[in-house]
Image (cartoon, rainbow, N blue to C red):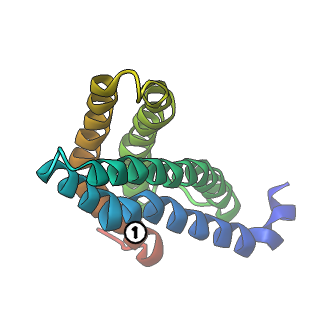
């Protein structure tokens, strides 16, 4: 079966790389370019209703980008596994071993937690935004804290994994 798929290897690699781009930049771009700015402005002036309205809108838009991110990530994993088997790689390659440790040890648990916060906890909190403002604010504060903690690590590990995949350095 793998031999029959080899003709599609470049296509699978393209889907993999395109999904990596979507996964790595969808929520990160939204977080860096409009969500964080809006949050800081709303925190500076918590009584400004226009800023609070913008913050709610920014949260809603950010949640949409997170959905895109969470669709792209399984595609990254599936196409990555396909390429692993199709190319005949083994974990004897140091670059691949390091990449897999980061993906399995960091990205997968991170995404599981992010999916839980975004798609399980988040909708429950948003459903009661009008009636339980404090609960909504606490839930959003949890998501914000999560983003603040993981963002620097994501900013380091994503470029590192891309470097490993492209350069395939020999370490020793």
Residue in the foreground of this view, choosing between 47 and 89: 47
Asked if residue 70 lies left or right of residue 143, the reply is right
Q: Residue furthest left?
A: 44
Question: If the image is split into quadrants, where does the N terminus sit?
Answer: bottom right
Q: Where does residue 83 sit, x and y in percent of width and height?
A: 65, 61
Q: Secondary structure at mark 1?
A: helix
- At x 55% / y 51%, what residue is drawn? 73
Residue in the foreground of this view, choosing between 72 and 108: 72
Residue in the foreground of this view, choosing between 147 and 62: 62
Q: Where does residue 103 sit, x and y in percent of width and height?
A: 43, 49
Q: Pointer 1: what residue?
A: 164
Asked which quadrant contains residue 121, the reply is top left
Asked if residue 99 lies left or right of residue 74, the reply is left
Number of dots carrying numbers: 1
- At x 53% / y 64%, what residue is drawn? 22
Q: Where does residue 62 sit, x and y in percent of width and height?
A: 44, 53
Q: From what the image shows, is residue 25 above or below residue 152?
A: below
Query: From this viewpoint, is residue 157 visible?
Result: no
Asked which quadrant contains residue 13, the reply is bottom right
Q: From what the image shows, is residue 161 above or below residue 78?
A: below
Query: From this viewpoint, is residue 108 visible?
Result: yes
Residue in the foreground of this view, choosing between 59 and 117: 59
Q: Where does residue 91 sit, x and y in percent of width and height?
A: 48, 53
């Amino acid at each position: 079966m793998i031999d029959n798929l080899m003709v599609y290897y470049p296509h699978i690699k393209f889907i993999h790389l395109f999904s990596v781009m979507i996964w790595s930049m969808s929520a990160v771009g939204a977080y860096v370019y409009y969500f964080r700015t809006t949050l800081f402005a709303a925190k500076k002036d918590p009584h400004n209703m226009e800023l609070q309205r913008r913050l709610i809108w920014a949260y809603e838009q950010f949640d949409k980008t997170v959905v895109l991110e969470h669709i792209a990530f399984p595609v990254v994993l599936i196409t990555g596994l396909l390429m692993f088997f199709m190319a005949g790689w083994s974990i004897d390659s140091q670059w691949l071993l390091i990449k897999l440790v980061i993906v399995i040890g960091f990205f997968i648990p991170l995404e599981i937690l992010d999916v839980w916060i975004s798609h399980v906890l988040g909708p429950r909190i948003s459903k009661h935004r009008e009636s339980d403002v404090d609960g909504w604010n606490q839930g959003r504060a949890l998501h914000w804290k999560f983003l603040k903690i993981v963002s620097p690590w994501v900013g380091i590990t994503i470029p590192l994994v891309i470097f490993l995949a492209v350069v395939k350095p020999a370490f020793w």
